[in-house]
Amino acid sequence: MSYLKEFTKGLIKENPNMVMLLGMCPTLAITTMASNGVGMGLSTTFVLVCSNIVISLLKKIIPDTVRLPAYIVIVAGFVTFVSLMLQAFLPDIYASLGMYLSLITVNCIILGRAEMFASKNKVIPSILDGLGMGLGFTLTLVLVGSVREIFGSGQWFGITIMPEFLEPMTLFILPAGGFFVLGVVIATVNRIMKKKPGEIGCHNCPNKDGCPGACEKAENNGGEQ
Amino acid sequence: MSALKKIKPVLVLSVICTLICALLIVTYNLTYVDTSGVLTDDLRAGCVKADGEGDYALVTDKAAAGLDGDEYKDIVKIVKNNTKNTFLFETVVDGYAADGIDAVIAMSADGKVSGISIIALGETPGLGSKINDDAFLGRFVGAGSDITIVKTEPKNENEVQGVTGSTLSSKGMAKAVNLAVKAYSVMNKEVQTA
């Protein structure tokens, strides 16, 4: 039961993009096509699951002082592995993701999950957490990518679906369109989930697990944050 | 005891780095494919688009063609169409993005451009990417040396009208064409004197 919860929380409730607002750079940069979103999302999911497994296994061995460099080395290793594999077997996706593939290394979703979850939990929950978060990320990318591709190029997954006489709105595949679409998608999802914006402060911060103790300290000092 | 405590983080990090490196070395060696000196599928498709179906072969010796100078470094590969006995040049030049335009330029026997196809384009979608329109690429067909990009209707033979909103990409394409024309004339001389 609780295992299932670890998996599903990443899909919508704690979706890394739409709720925690992490990993914005790839979300805006590569979502000009829905197929890019699938490639990027699944690559990130793979890296996330692998790094969560390794970090969760090594959590007692890695000393606290060097944990961040150790996590980054592990993540970077898996990212390079994925990009070599994509280059060899799926060169089209490799070409369209370009440098954003290597930038998965510094995607805060991955380091965030390592720091907040994998370094404190057992292996199986960590795998499920990584899988859920990764698929949640993929879901957002495909959603944003679909909207941008349909309006910006008149296609969906490369298949023309808009009638010929409608000129595609190029704005949607330019960076500005990315911001618009992402904003609207986040708003829509939060509306459907009936999520009300909480009071701004430490306790409502979706990333508060990442800074243990700092929250209580701030509250005790009378400050809001 | 405290010495061990100080060394342990360094040791653990080093071991992790070594293991990750080993994993990557193995992966790299398993997946690496050397494409230099090979007529790849992408390049062949580009050649077919620029010069029609034919029997294409790579000219591997750039130096023998007289093209080993620094000014020809943007010419990546030279392909010969054995069916028509013509040459094609793959060039990678800067458009708006560095190395943004990877194009194949086919030359006819009289040293004029006979066709262009773009293999990979890293230019801005909706702006620079418009240079991939056949209408624009078609303006270069029959072009000779020293092409310049103009913003209005071309008045002289060596002028080509650029694409609105993609001046730098248009200029990049012109640079690629000029390079191919020049390379072809140098190569022809070399062949005749040899």
Image: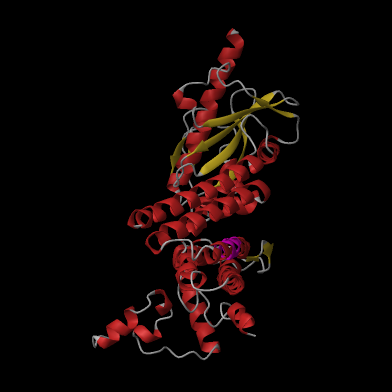
Q: How many marks?
A: 0
Task: Give the left or right position of residue A115, taking residue B131 as reference.
Answer: left
Residue drawn at (56%, 77%) of the image? A10
Residue A45 within the segment the image draws in magenta: yes
**Residue B83 location (% of width, % of height):** 76, 26
Task: Give the left or right position of residue B89, taking residue A175 as reference.
Answer: right
Question: Seen from this angle, which residue lies furthest top?
Answer: B193
Q: Nearer the viewer, residue B168 or A41?
A: A41
Residue drawn at (29%, 82%) of the image? A217
SS majority, magenta: helix
In the rendered view, would you say B91 is above or below B120?
Answer: above
**Residue B32 location (% of width, % of height):** 63, 40
In the rendered view, would you say B67 is above or below B53?
Answer: above
Tell me which corner region of the image, top left, top right, bottom left or bottom right, holds residue B142: top right
**Residue B169 location (% of width, % of height):** 47, 45
Q: Which quarter shows the C terminus of chain A?
A: bottom left
Tell me which corner region of the image, top left, top right, bottom left or bottom right, holds residue A145: bottom right
Residue drawn at (45%, 66%) of the image? A108
Residue A19 within the segment the image draws in magenta: no
**Residue A89 location (% of width, % of height):** 68, 49
Asked whether residue B159 is in view, the answer is: no
Q: Which quarter shows the N terminus of chain A?
A: bottom right
Q: Nearer the viewer, residue A193 or A116?
A: A116
Residue drawn at (71%, 38%) of the image? B48
User: How are the residues colored?
Assistant: secondary structure
Q: Nearer the viewer, residue A105 or A100?
A: A105
Task: Give the left or right position of residue A224, taking residue B97 as reference.
Answer: left
Asked whether residue A139 is in view, the answer is: yes
Magenta residue span: A43-51
Q: Nearer the viewer, residue B79 or B114?
A: B79
In the rendered view, would you say B154 is above or below B58?
Answer: below
